[in-house]
Image (tube, rainbow, N blue to C red):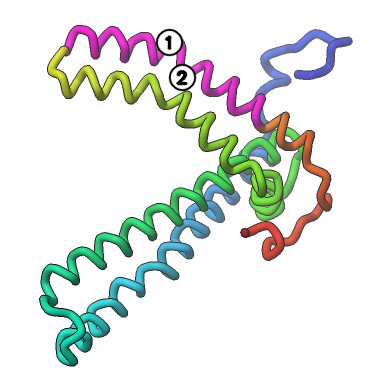
Amino acid sequence: MDDEESDVKIVDTLPTRQQIIRFLIATLYFVGCILFIGMILFPVLYILDPVLRYLVQIGWVESFQKTGIVITQIAVGIAILALFITWLRISFFPFFIIDKNAAPFESIKLSLAITKGNFTKILLLLLVLGGGYLVYLLFNLLHWPFVAFVVNILSSFIIVPLSSVAITVAYRKISGEYKGDEHPDILHNIV
């Protein structure tokens, strides 16, 4: 759609069959990445239980139940945070499929590469865009259903389309600033 010399037709903006197939495969990779991170972090919860029981036996920890709950909540919180970070880092994969006609796994790698060093900017953008929903939740908690309904309608017609444009502009900006390899590897872009 960036071609200024020719007229844009709706038919030209529709994804091709190959792009749809690549998107579906990349979505499976996306889900696989999230599940993989979850599978890495989930055993921590099982490791904590015997460790805490041992610490109670040797007298280092006074109460298993209270300490176990706190440590488990911390571990679950860390796991959720890691899953969110992973989700945010690889969420730009559809843009590479449409814009650069990248292969499914290549689009995941490119998403990791361009978000390296831009995580805070993307997070702040999402917080600003999610502000409308947070205002809706606030009015809902205050039991002001009419105001919450108005905010929800405004959010649906203003924030949702604006967020699509803002995410696309963010993609363009951070991919334009990317000076890395055309075919990045995963290990150098994870952290």
Give the answer, above or below, for where 25 lies relative to 47. above
Residue at (66, 36) in percent of width and height: 95
User: Where does the magenta region start and end?
Assistant: 145-170
Using residue 39 as the reference point, say whether residue 177 is left or right of it.
right
**What secondary structure is found at the residue carrying circle 1?**
helix
Q: Which mark is residue 160?
A: 2
Q: Quadrant of the C terminus?
A: bottom right
Horizontal and vertical percent for residue 185? Answer: 74, 61
Horizontal and vertical percent for residue 48? Answer: 28, 77
Residue at (69, 34) in percent of width and height: 98
Horizontal and vertical percent for residue 151? Answer: 31, 11
Q: Are marks 1 and 2 in contact (CB under 8 Å)?
A: yes
Q: Is residue 3 magenta?
A: no
Q: How many residues crowd around disc 2 within 10 Å: few (fewer than 14), some, or many (20 or more)?
A: some
For badge 1, the amino acid type reads Phe
Query: Which quadrant of the figure has residue 75?
Result: bottom left
Farthest-out residue, right = 5
Query: Which quadrant of the figure has residue 134?
Result: top left
For badge 2, the amino acid type reads Val
Find disc 1 in the rendering and name its residue: 157
Q: Is residue 166 magenta?
A: yes
Of residue 184 and residue 123, the one placed in the foreground of this image is 123
Of residue 185 and residue 141, the one placed in the foreground of this image is 141
Residue at (48, 65) in percent of width and height: 36
**What secondary structure is found at the residue carrying circle 2?**
helix
Of residue 158 and residue 11, the one placed in the foreground of this image is 158
